[in-house]
Amino acid sequence: MDGLLRHYEKNKEHYSKPETFDRRILHSIEMGWFILDKYYTMTEDAPVYAAALLLDPSKRIRYIERHWPESWHENAIAGVRTIWEEYKTQPETGPAESVDEVSASQKRQPNEWDALLEELEVTEDLGDSMDDLEDFIKATPIKISGSPLQWWCHNDQRKTYPQLSRLAIDILSIAPESADPESAFSGGRRTLSWDRERMTCENLEKVECIGNWLREGHIQKTVHGGMGVITDTGFDSGGGEDSDVNFD
């Protein structure tokens, strides 16, 4: 929406000049601006939109401070913090450790020597004092090659920000408009034919979602560990491998 507003601003300025003045285009711009401004103002009451901007590694808090009215800043960020409070207390469910990492961590139990070294430790446990959301949104924005959702789906991000990555994936997975979800679920009748009506609504939803995710390249078929979110969408979705998905 910010891009559309910027487009209206530039063209209104252009067609207001004497040498390029066009009353009809200006009227169209004003009508479009009126409708867009109506929905743009609603974002002040929708923390999810602000969360999508703050969790975009190429935008973060700098984007809001630069492009949003100052009177909106406090409420927008406070709304995102409220959502974050629900996620930060959830148990960590980051990417599974590799075999090497697990074997190394289970190699031996701490002994007396380890206890002596721990007494000499000068580092601090920042687990309670750190806030991943604050650290992330206040960091310098970076350029990314893919979408923000793809960036957060990388194992590196999910390992660094276990709870925050879950929030980001939940927020950034929301479709900006209803056309795609409606299209995805319109195939429900083909899946749930008249002779297969014993399938539960929950399983039908899972089948339609997984089918859409496979077509879009968000997950891959594998016989090793079920289906997992991936960031590289260039996989072969053809046959040959079975999925480990359990619909129960």
Image (cartoon, rainbow, N blue to C red):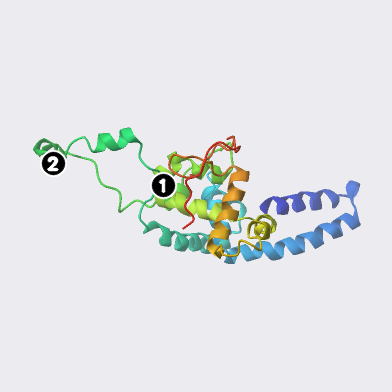
Which quadrant holds residue 175?
bottom right
**In the drawing, does residue 137 fall left or right of residue 41?**
left
From the top left corner, tell me how far across and down residue 109 is, in percent.
Answer: 16, 39
**In the drawing, does residue 237 fall left or right of residue 166?**
right
Q: Which amino acid does label 2 sit on?
A: Glu
Element under disc 1? loop
Q: Can residue 141 be seen in this view?
A: no
Mark 2 or 1: in front is 1
Q: Is residue 48 visible?
A: yes
**In the drawing, does residue 66 fall left or right of residue 94?**
right
| Figure quadrant of the N terminus | bottom right
In depth, the one of 203 and 14 nearer the eye is 203
Q: What residue type is labelled 1?
A: Tyr
Label 1 sits on residue:
161
Label 2 sits on residue:
119
Element under disc 2? helix
Give the vertical position of 112 relative to 137 (above or below).
Answer: above
From the top left corner, tell me how far across and down residue 101 is, in percent.
Answer: 31, 35
Label 2 close to label 1 by CB (< 8 Å): no
Residue lying farthest front?
195
Q: Residue at x 90, y 57 (%)?
A: 24
Mark earlier in primary sequence (2, 1): 2
Which quadrant holds residue 237?
top right
Q: Dot 1, crowdedness within 10 Å: few (<14), some or many (≥20)?
A: some
From the top left corner, tell me how far across and down residue 235 is, in percent.
Answer: 58, 35
Q: Dot 2, crowdedness within 10 Å: few (<14), some or many (≥20)?
A: few
